[in-house]
Image (cartoon, helix red, strand yellow):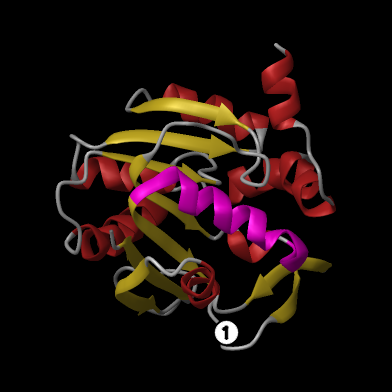
Amino acid sequence: NNMSDAFSRTETVQEGFWAGEFGNSYIQRNDSSKIVRSNIALFSKVLARTNDLGTLVEFGANIGNNLRAIHVLNPNIKLSAVEINEKACNRLREFKEVSSVKLGSILTYKSDETFDLSLSKGLLIHIHPDHLPLAYNSLYQASHRYVLLCEYYNPTPVNVVYRGHDDRLFKRDFAGDMMSLYSDLRLLDYGFVYRNDPVFPQDDLTWFLMEKIT
């Protein structure tokens, strides 16, 4: 239908990059149980800081490596996903524990539904800084309680060459940005996971869990 066409249309160079062949090859590189194991270790720390988590949405869910880990930790959480790559969406839909999969971009996401937690993991780093306010707004509006960002942190914004491509990876203080934009967001906890962790490595990710204070 026209709604889904408008929703899934790619608006930026970065979005086209992930919706197309590069995004398809990313799926193959990141299809492993080892990643899910490390995600279980990461999300166990995060979920321990939340209360009464019943619903969540992940933006940029890819094939569901994060959602699979969360489901292992708490199968009672109702999982939803927004993903720009069609092949990844098809894989997500095979994972029956995800109740809603929407093909589309965080930048054009519109929904009246809100969740206990909205999250991005390795997504904001791939959005051009000019478009970040739209991404922040989607994460903020989608949650009525918690917002979780798992991204590459840098105190000042930097552009990093990513697999030979310029303007495809950006580091900055995403959580700091959001807390500056939205005065009712409060930092609950944060942590760093080192790529050389001997048991549960992540790609030098820093996670920030924020809560809306009403």
Query: Which picture quadrant has residue 77?
Result: top left
Would residue 99 be found to the left or right of residue 87 on screen? left
Given residues 114 and 58, the one toward you in this image is: 114
Q: Residue at x 61, y 45 (%)?
A: 106
Q: Main secondary structure of the magenta part?
A: helix
Given residues 163 and 43, the one toward you in this image is: 43
Up the image or down, 183 lies above or below 67; here it is below
**Secondary structure of the residue carrying numbered label 1:** loop
Number of other residues with Cα within 10 Å of mark 1, as a class: few under 14, some 14 to 19, many 20 or more = few
Q: Residue at x 69, y 45 (%)?
A: 23
Residue named by callout 1: 154
Query: Which stretch is magenta?
Result: 128-144
Kind of residue sitting beneath label 1: Asn
Query: Which picture quadrant has residue 116?
Result: top left
Up the image or down, 171 lies above or below 31; here it is below
Quarter of the figure that contains the N terminus: top right
Up the image or down, 170 lies above or below 64; here it is below
